[in-house]
Image (cartoon, rainbow, N blue to C red):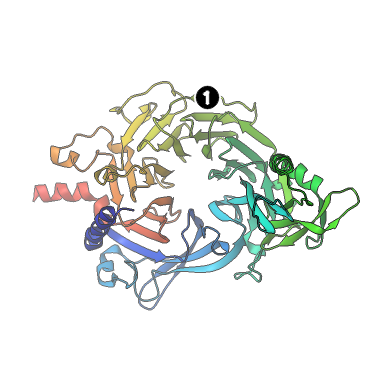
């Protein structure tokens, strides 16, 4: 980040901080030890009466992204949200010393109450709607192929006795299933990841992950390999473990070749290369292979068998418990020509879902009929499409967000029609709307201003939120589309842009509407900050108050 840009962001944050008491009824800003790429509110709520202030206890799902510098963990947090009359909050609101915001008297806290060891960084975590204790995570694990050449000699070349050549690396995007109730609040062993099940089917990492709100146990996942995988978790014996030791297993080179043929190709290439170059002494190929579960496999130089194949022993640095259940995907949907960035179930129709990707396509699928999309909209955006969400109230409406800085609203009944703005009443929302947003990034010359997440409000059919790389979370009001504006108002944005949360100073990767409190939103950013906020009630009644002032 350039110095001038960082200075601009800091000045912008100071202005927001100064004006935030007038814009919010609630701000809870917490600095985590590591950034979280994901967040989701649990559905439960417990009201508590305190001596000084009443508040509610609610839970929040987070994950860590340590970039392999520390143990990654799935985090269950307890958030204490004050519940007094908003008019009384002015006397309770006070600045904290770390970031900003907070309440005194025991309320206004974000506390981690459970940690579950996770293998690899957590790209996304989502719980099952019918059973919130069951949590699925999108992970990123690396498979390394490393070539070691030992005891090499050639007079005209100086070479170390042991030389390591980096051969090949591949990411594998397995989906982990955890039953939160079967894990302690604090892990006993930080070196072992103990999921209840591992779901395989992807060859690369990804971010799309969605449980069906209609059919219990159906889980969709998308990946950078362009595929969409579907599992029925009800058919997986979660919690039924098989005893299997992984400390002294012996694998042959043939086993490694069967696991990943690509690595073997590179090994053979280098074998013949060094033979041709005239190395005389014995040549060993020691393969360090880090499997999808984090287990390191090394060839044993001292235990060559009679057939000339090196024995390979398993050595565990940080491993995944092999006793968990494993399952391949039941169905794989292949139609995207590039990364499939996100996938989402229809919230009313049990077999319909949609997907988007870097190929700029929006696809509508039906899991019952065939493995090809029912509808395919090419060039749905001018750039990569990063996210989408179905409306929880109208099964025909889909919202998508893209790197072109637009949020598009679609109706599955008329996907071919495209209108810039619609001046018709809500029943005719069967066109495509464009909302140009996140303009702030253009003032500082940023190019990474894509939209990373969109989500409908679970409490209203006209409100939705979006966040992106420009550090903003924007709440949109679809009922305001086409409303007339004065020139002064148009300078602040289109009429449907209801509220802009500018409390983050880094890229906002995810957001989540609170399921119990209609206007409470949580957002997470790359600089370890998680913020829970609620815009002031006065903004919601702004039109009524303006009319009152005009009458007076």
Q: Residue 488 versus residue 438: which sits nearer the camera?
A: 438
Residue 330 higher or lower than 182, as above or below: above
- Can residue 63 be seen in this snapshot? no
Give the x, y percent position of residue 305: 88, 53
**Mark 1: few, some, or many residues within 10 Å (few <14, many ≥20)?**
some
- Single out the residue that lies furthest toward the right: 306
464 and 308: which one is in front? 308
Residue 20 vs residue 167, the one in the foreground: 167
The local secondary structure at tag 1 comes to: strand
Residue 498 in the image: above or below residue 433: below
Residue at (55%, 51%) from the top-left corner? 126
Left or right: 34, with 261 as reference point? left
**Which residue in the rendered view is the most extreme toward the top?**
416
Q: Residue furthest left?
A: 552
Q: Nearer the viewer, residue 395 or 235?
A: 235
Residue with the mark numbered 1: 375
Does residue 223 sit above or below 25 in this rendering? above
* Badge count: 1
In the image, residue 103 lies at what x, y percent?
A: 34, 71
Image-based side of 92 in relation to 303, left or right: left
Please tell me in which quadrant of the rendered image residue 50 appears. bottom left
Looking at the image, the residue that sits furthest to the bottom is: 51
Q: Quadrant of residue 71?
A: bottom right
Position of 150 compared to 371: left or right?
right
Q: Residue at x 40, y 68 (%)?
A: 55
């Amino acid at each position: 980040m350039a110095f001038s840009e960082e200075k601009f962001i800091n000045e912008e944050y100071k202005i927001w901080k100064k004006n935030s008491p007038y814009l919010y009824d609630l701000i809870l800003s917490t600095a985590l030890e590591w950034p979280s790429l994901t967040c989701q509110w649990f559905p439960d709520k417990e009201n508590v009466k305190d001596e000084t202030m009443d508040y509610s206890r609610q839970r929040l799902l987070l994950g860590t992204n340590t970039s392999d510098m520390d143990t990654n963990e799935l985090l269950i947090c307890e958030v204490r949200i004050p519940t007094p009359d908003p008019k009384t909050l002015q006397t309770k609101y006070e600045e904290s010393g770390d970031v900003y915001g907070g309440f005194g008297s025991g309320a206004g806290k974000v506390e981690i109450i459970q940690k579950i060891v996770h293998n690899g960084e957590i790209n996304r975590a989502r719980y099952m709607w019918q059973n919130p204790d069951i949590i699925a995570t999108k992970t990123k694990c690396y498979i390394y192929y490393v070539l070691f050449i030992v005891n090499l000699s050639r007079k005209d070349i100086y070479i170390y006795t042991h030389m390591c050549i980096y051969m090949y690396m591949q990411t594998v995007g397995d989906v982990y299933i955890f039953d939160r109730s079967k894990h302690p609040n604090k892990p006993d062993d930080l070196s072992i990841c103990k999921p209840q099940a591992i779901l395989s089917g992807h060859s690369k990492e990804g971010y799309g992950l969605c449980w069906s709100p209609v059919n219990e146990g159906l889980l969709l996942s998308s990946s950078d390999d362009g595929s969409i995988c579907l599992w029925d978790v009800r058919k997986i014996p979660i919690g039924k473990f098989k005893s299997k030791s992984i400390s002294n297993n012996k694998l042959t080179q043939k086993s490694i070749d069967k696991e990943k043929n690509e690595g073997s190709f590179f090994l053979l290439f280098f074998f013949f290369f060094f033979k041709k170059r005239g190395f005389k002494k014995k040549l060993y190929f020691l393969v360090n292979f880090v499997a999808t579960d984090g287990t390191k496999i090394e060839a044993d130089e001292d235990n060559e068998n009679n057939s000339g194949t090196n024995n390979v022993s398993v050595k565990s640095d940080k491993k995944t418990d092999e006793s968990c259940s494993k399952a391949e995907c039941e169905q794989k949907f292949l139609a995207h020509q590039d990364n499939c960035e996100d996938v989402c179930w229809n919230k009313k129709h049990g077999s319909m879902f949609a997907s988007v990707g870097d190929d700029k396509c929006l696809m509508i699928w039906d899991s019952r009929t065939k493995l090809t999309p029912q509808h395919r909209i090419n060039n749905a955006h001018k750039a990569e499409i990063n996210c989408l969400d179905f409306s929880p109230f109208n099964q025909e409406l889909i919202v998508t967000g893209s790197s072109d800085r637009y949020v598009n609203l679609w109706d599955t009944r008329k996907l071919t029609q495209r209108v810039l703005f619609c001046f018709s009443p809500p029943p005719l929302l069967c066109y495509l709307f464009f909302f140009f947003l996140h303009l702030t990034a253009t003032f500082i010359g940023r190019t990474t201003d894509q939209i990373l997440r969109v989500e409908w409000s679970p409490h209203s059919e006209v409100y939705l939120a979006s966040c992106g790389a420009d550090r903003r979370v924007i709440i949109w009001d679809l009922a305001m589309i086409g409303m007339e504006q004065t020139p002064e108002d148009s300078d602040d944005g289109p009429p449907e842009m209801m509220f802009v949360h500018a409390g983050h100073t880094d890229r906002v990767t995810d957001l989540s509407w609170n399921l119990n409190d209609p206007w409470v939103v949580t957002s997470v950013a790359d600089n370890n900050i998680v913020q829970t906020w609620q815009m002031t009630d006065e903004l919601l009644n702004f039109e009524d108050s303006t009319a009152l002032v005009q009458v007076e």
